[in-house]
Structures are given as structure tokens and as C-alpha cells.
Amino acid sequence: MISRLNDLIADILADALSTMACFWIITVMVVVVLFWQRPNTMVGWITYISTAIFQASALPVLAFVAKKEGARQQVLLQETHDTVMGELDKLGNLIQEINDTHDELRALVSQIHVKVGASEVDVTVTEETPPGEADS
């Protein structure tokens, strides 16, 4: 129960915090603070820029870009899956055609044996030696 609730909250927060709207809200809040309180020293500015700009504003953008790239990867994976499944279906059809042709050929060989008068019909596939390689 708690695990499902945690997952639900995490999903909602991840979706909300990885939007460009979140980026703009945080960026406006970070910049508006400068009207009332500015850092006085170089160390203050460096601290402000690293914490406020990079950590607050950049993280939603990074999450947004990662989310977009994940969606692109999902589309690519689906296209690849569909292509592979289509090729697999074609291969299955070819194998079925080969099996049908094989059955037809076996039937023809049986008919030939009957017409020739062979008493036993042996339609097994044997490997024949090509001419000129018999006594190598």
C-alpha cells in the first residue's frame, strides 16, 4: 500500500517537475529575489548562481529534455519492433510456402514411382556427391 502511494507521488512529482512551466516558475522566482536581496561579494554571486540558477532552474530543463528523449527512444523502439515483427511474419510465410512446395514435390515423386512401377516409395532426401568428386 505505502509502496504504491510512494510510486504514485513520485510519478506525479516527476511529471510536474519535468515541465517547462516548472522551469519558468522557478526561474522567475530566482530572478525576482534579486530585486530585494543581492549578493554583495563574488563568493555570494558564485553561490547564488550555482545554487539558484544551476540547481533550481536547470534541473527541470534537464528532466524535460530527458523525458523528451525517452519518448523519442520509445517511438524508435516501437518502430524497430514493428519492423522486426513484420520481417518475422514474412519469414514464417516463406517457410510455410517451402513446406507446401516440399509436400507437393513429395507427392509428385510418389506419383512418378507409382507410374514407373517401383514397389517401395523412398522419398527421403539424400546428399549426392557432385560429379568428379566420387573417388577423391
Image (cartoon, grey):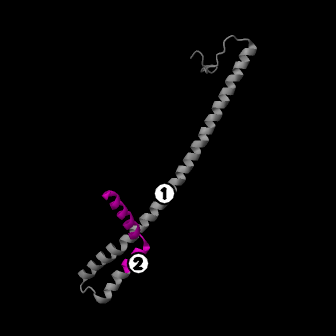
**Residue 63, relative to residue 32: is it above or below?**
above
Bin the neighbour count of mark 1 within 10 Å (Cα to Cα): few under 14, some 14-19, many 20 and up: few
Residues under numbered marks 2 and 1 in contact, where contact means CB atoms less than 8 Å apart? no
Q: Residue 92 location, x and y as percent?
A: 59, 38
- Numbered disc 1: secondary structure: helix
- How far is disc 2 from disc 1 in space, using C-alphas? 27 Å
Q: Is residue 4 magenta?
A: yes
Residue most extreme to the bottom: 36
Amino acid at dot 2: Trp
Which numbered dot is residue 74?
A: 1
Magenta residues? 1-27
State the residue lying farthest toward the front: 1
Q: In the displayed structure, does residue 121 sit left or right of residue 14?
A: right
Type of amino acid under label 1: Gln
Q: In this picture, is 136 found above or below 18?
A: above
**Of 122 and 13, which appears nearest the observer?**
13
* Residue drawn at the location 52% of the way across and 54% of the way down: 78
The residue at 70%/11% (across/down) is 118
Q: Main secondary structure of the magenta part?
A: helix
Residue 24 is labelled as: 2
Report the side of 38 relative to 27 (left or right): left
> Tag 2's secondary structure?
helix
